[in-house]
Amino acid sequence: MSISLNGLNPAQCFIGGVWCDPVAGDTLELINPSDASHLCNIAKGGAEDIDRAVAAAETAMRGDWGRSTAVERSRILYKTGQLVLDHIDQLAEFEAKDVGKPLKQARADVVALARYMEFYAGAADKIHGATIPYLDGYTVYTLRQPHGVTGHIVPWNYPMQIIGRSVGAALAMGNACVLKPAEEACLTALYFAELMSQAGLPAGALNVVPGLGAEAGAALSGHEGIHHMSFTGSVGVGKLIQQSAGANVVPVTLELGGKSPQLVFDDAGIDAALPFLVNAGIQNAGQTCSASSRILVQRGVYDQVLTRMAQRYGALRAGPAMDDFDVGPLVSNRQKDIVEGFLKRGSDLKVAAQGAVVGDAPIGGAYVAPTLFESVSPDHALAQDEIFGPVQVIIPFETEEEALAIANGTKFGLVASVWSADGARQMRLAKALRAGQVFLNNYGAGGGVELPFGGTGLSGHGREKGFEALYGFSSLKTVAALHG
Ligand code: NAD
């Protein structure tokens, strides 16, 4: 089943406000992971297309876009948010078919994209510099200015949300963006560019070049014409991006993977915790950077939590994205092979429970049954490495100190949560946990666009989302006037 993009040709790039063929004329095939069918061909952009996109962004910065006021940018972003909501059915369908995301989750991502536009529309004219008391005869103040041309490389798991948070904040601050979406899923990126154009975004302020990471992606991150690089993806590629951008002394924001824990203490409200414990592991089939893949449970409630999580797992169903099961397919059969490799590495572990792939799931779809392992040692590969599939491990612990050591005992540090009624413990752990976000008696806090997000260690550095992102997507200038 191929897909129609409402008149857009998905095999084109969006450069300088115009849809155009990639210079080499090459294309890549997009596959629907629910049934392995051909969706459409997309452009296979390369270095020459990235050159054109960076040049278009530079031109925009020298023209109307570079002179735009915060309120003008705010209005364009707000209008884009409205257009996104007007097109929720189309965008959700593209994301469900492209990523394999269950339709309800895809619709939630559309709403989140609109929220990013609304939030950064509201924030654009509320960020400013300061005056600094200084020596007699001086007036000193700071200006917050755009970097210039910003590069954005995004992965396939949450294209709309990640584009919203990074491109939205960069445009709010007046940068011109070059976006390289993932080769596995880029339809919503293309459609979003069209909606921004309809909302009145000047030519060149947002350019989209689909293509392979090693070609278009590498050309963008190493380009001498970019002034800031935002990357979301794997640790291995993040290291490459940091090196290539570093060669041009370009600042980099890296949002990488995670192995995020939830710590469940004996005094926790188990009824309240349960839906979060499981959902945080299976949302988007576990292909979420902030997925909670480690559940640490204190001995006193271990049996109860294990039994109830296992019951939930037993009821989980994986099936086609458009049919909206608990879990969709993984994004590709390549990703399925990776996750099945991890399940094999867990063959020495005890499976507590497994969900099922529905009987009539199309042959060739990238389905993996959600799997829960019990009594896992904290140093086992499945408790250390990011799996990026619907797999969770339960790890028992005795004391708060032990729980903290296990929680902090991986190379990652993205998010963590604490389930306990003890306020002092909550405060102690919120400070001590190695993570960019800590949740107390919840997990994810609904993913609010307002909440600064990012990691430490192998999870990356820099913060996106919230007001904080606006500082990252701008440069501070100090002006000192000596007037006597
Ligand atoms: P990936 O790193 O392979 O790809 C991400 C993007 O980088 C894609 O657009 C790809 O084309 C591009 N890319 C690949 N090689 C490149 C290169 N040499 N130079 C420049 N660009 C290149 O990751 P993935 O498989 O798409 O995504 C899964 C990973 O992303 C997981 O590890 C996950 O944890 C992480 N992730 C993190 C977050 C976060 O916010 N922290 C969000 C989503 C995904």
Image: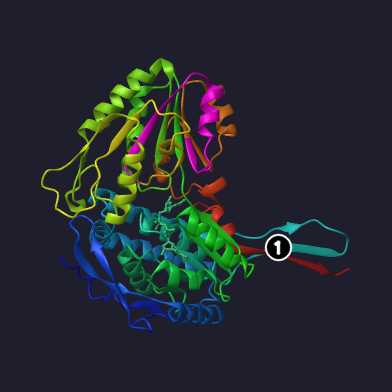
Residue at point 38%, 47% (across, down)? 288
Say which of 156 and 239 sits in front: 239
Instruction: Look at mark 1 in the image and give the residue it sits on.
Output: 142
Disc 1 is placed on an element classified as strand
Whole-percent x, y for residue 111 in the image: 33, 54
Tell me if I can see residue 456 in this picture. Answer: no
Tell me if I can see residue 84 in this picture. Answer: yes
Q: Could you tell whether 128 is left or right of 376 in the image?
A: right
For ligand 1, the image quadrant comes to bottom left
Say which of 77 and 71 sits in front: 77
Whole-percent x, y for residue 299 in the image: 43, 17
Residue at point 53%, 48% (across, down)? 458
Q: What type is the residue that disc 1 sits on?
A: Thr
Examine the image and state in which quarter residue 94 appears. Answer: bottom left
Q: Could you tell whether 168 is left or right of 346 in the image?
A: right
Whole-percent x, y for residue 166 in the image: 47, 60
State which quarter of the image contains the N terminus.
bottom left
Let me know if residue 398 is in the magenta part. yes
Residue at point 31%, 47% (across, down)? 284
Q: Which residues are magenta?
A: 389-416
Q: Residue furthest top?
A: 300
